Image (cartoon, coloured by chain):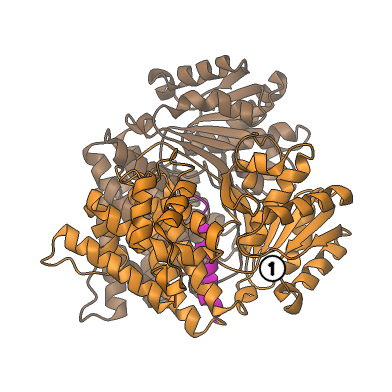
Chain colours: A brown, B orange
Amino acid sequence: MDNFVQYAPTEVVFGKGTEKQAGSEVKKWGGSRVLIVYGGGSVIKSGVLDRVKRSLDEEDIVYDEIGGVKPNPRLALAEEGVKKAIEFQADFILGVGGGSVIDTAKGIAHGTANPTLDLWEIWTGKIPLTKSIPVGVVLTIAAAGSEMSDSAVLTNEEVGRKVGISTPFNRVKFAVMNPELAFTVPKKQIACGVTDIMMHTMERYFIPGFTCEMTDEIAEGLLRTVMRNGTKALENQEDYDVMAEIMWCSSLSHNDLTSCGRGKDFSVHKMGQALGAKYDITHGETLSVLWGSWARFQYDTAPDRFARYAVNVMGISSQGKSQMEIAKEGIEKTEEYFQSLGMPISLSELGIHPSDEEIHDLAMNATQQDTLKLSRLKPLSAAEVETIYKMA
Amino acid sequence: MDNFVQYAPTEVVFGKGTEKQAGSEVKKWGGSRVLIVYGGGSVIKSGVLDRVKRSLDEEDIVYDEIGGVKPNPRLALAEEGVKKAIEFQADFILGVGGGSVIDTAKGIAHGTANPTLDLWEIWTGKIPLTKSIPVGVVLTIAAAGSEMSDSAVLTNEEVGRKVGISTPFNRVKFAVMNPELAFTVPKKQIACGVTDIMMHTMERYFIPGFTCEMTDEIAEGLLRTVMRNGTKALENQEDYDVMAEIMWCSSLSHNDLTSCGRGKDFSVHKMGQALGAKYDITHGETLSVLWGSWARFQYDTAPDRFARYAVNVMGISSQGKSQMEIAKEGIEKTEEYFQSLGMPISLSELGIHPSDEEIHDLAMNATQQDTLKLSRLKPLSAAEVETIYKMA
């Protein structure tokens, strides 16, 4: 087991009707002037935004708001939020939505606490982040796990780059999670969410070289649970227990519980982010499109690990097969699972046929101009990443 | 899934050599004047106390110390610690040891922050606890899980009562965990620790009435992992990975991760605490002695749950058997496991043969004079608790 630090201080308030506790939670965590961040009209239509506002009113908390967050959230909107938060003298940012909203809320918090600094320079690590203001979350979609993670991703449209930042300041104070709020999420988004949750777990699980029995038990249990319930949710997304499992898995997949003693590399995420920045396809799609090709490129480096996954997660029988055969079957069955959710497993399914030059650009972007080696299996420089994009 | 709050803010610093980070951790969490709390001579003999002190020196943190904490830690020593901490003007309490040391450190912190209040009145809930001072931990024994839990137990010898208190103020700021420090722990203590870890998990697992797939996956994975590694540790306790699994399981068993959506009742603990207060047998022994009788008394209320445990944790084949048969087999095999660790499964093995009157007193103590109903399976009043004690 490798040395590790595990720090997941977010207070999770989970269950039916919990969005009504948003106000008391904000108060508990020291907020008195709140900027509410949300996405499109769904939180208005569903009434959840109103319920959250009422709960703030009940605690005599004043608020302003900014809506319009879109998938692959934009730096520009976060910067607009920073301006608004500073004008309003906000001391707390409250995100009401899914991963894009939460990441935007985190960006606004960092920018508000550092009004003289350039947010993109903070985001890209040129200026170190040393303070922020508190963030709380009312989660409406189970997917990104941002409600408990130390990471956030924004896209700078001007330079065409999607960049993630990891910092303890990205841990939100509280996350209110009512699975009922996800009953009305479009099926496509549920499928993307399940894919993302799986990927957060697998980008930690496929780190070789350590014995981590408890961490593996959690990861394998999480993958089985989210896959089983993902299938059920597409049949009936108003089953509370089903949505509750997916929502809880989303948080546990990304609060680092499944990397304890093993680590993480997020190589598929990084390749996916380059795709997402260029083509504006959803985050989940970039992952399901790339994972199979990534896995086929990698599995001979750690066939035991891929075979264990195949048996313990995908339920493949090992009888009379070599490790390599079992591993390969596990990859195929995972792609079949993605397809059963309606997720693409190749770029061409999305009508995307990048030229060699475009693929080269994508690979350079994913590897920060070939300076970064992705993955802790075979190291992936730009050349290897190009191969994987071509396979996809 | 039942509504729940999950809040485990402790920063875990896990791995080889991490005790050298105690000083920087204390500083990070705001400590400058530290009272160190420890038990017997083992932390002196092993050199860990010296290493911790050196790391405090390196950060220019001053400290005083109090040793002598024993199993079933005493209120009196905690009160002595409070006096010392106040005299020293300590702003941070650092426990170096196992569960008894940590619980004492928590008690000292609460007493120090409330110098005009009676600690036992706080402990027994007569006075609400509204503040404390920060506590950090250098863990040397994997067992109690107190390093991440919201609970702590002290024994008041004057009145012969062992009482636990649960409060968010019991969450320590950081827990430094180096499995190597547990290499020299007596085998008996390792066995007791494994039993305690199992029990923390089972006192949450055997709550009926909710569907909690992810929580069950974690609980079952934890039980399998700690049992497998418990057996290995008794063969070779200097195997780093083995001790690391047990130590990590100890924290995860008691940070409420395994009660999310299900809850907990701690009925065996409460019965065991009454035993521990009267006979001064170790905490782990009280649990292994009572669990089988508790389970036999309870399993017909939720045979499905006990049968699931038998199959998924104890590896019992379900073929051709009724749920009740499978459940019973699971209980038997669990007792066999305790015996394989050298743990007692009856009071008589410990030479304890309480009279009917003594059993009545124990039951009254465990149920707070028959005012408390233990367990969320069959409710256990004093009469039922008497029956279980007699069975044991």
Residue B96 image position (x, y, % from top left): 71, 64
Q: Amino acid at mark 1?
A: Thr
Q: Which quadrant holds residue A178?
A: top left
Q: Residue A269 versus residue B100: which sits nearer the camera?
A: B100
| Magenta stretch bounds | B239-257
The reply to whether residue A294 is in sight is: no
Q: Residue B180 versus residue A187: which sits nearer the camera?
A: B180
Q: Which quadrant holds residue B322?
A: bottom left
Helix, strand or loop at disc 1?
helix
Task: Check the image and report above or below for A288 versus A232.
Answer: below
Q: Which quadrant holds residue B128?
A: top right
Q: Which residue is mark 1?
A: B18
Q: Residue B302 versus residue B389: which sits nearer the camera?
A: B389
Residue A236 image position (x, y, % from top left): 23, 36
In reply to whether residue A58 is colored magenta, the answer given is no
Quadrant that contains the N terminus of chain A: bottom right
The reply to whether residue B232 is in sight is: yes
Residue at position x 41%, y 50% in the image: A197
* Chain ID of residue with mark 1: B
Q: Residues within 10 Å of mark 1 (few under 14, many from 20)?
A: some
Quadrant that contains the C terminus of chain A: bottom left
Task: Check the image and report above or below for A17 versus B159.
Answer: above
Residue at position x 41%, y 26% in the image: A17
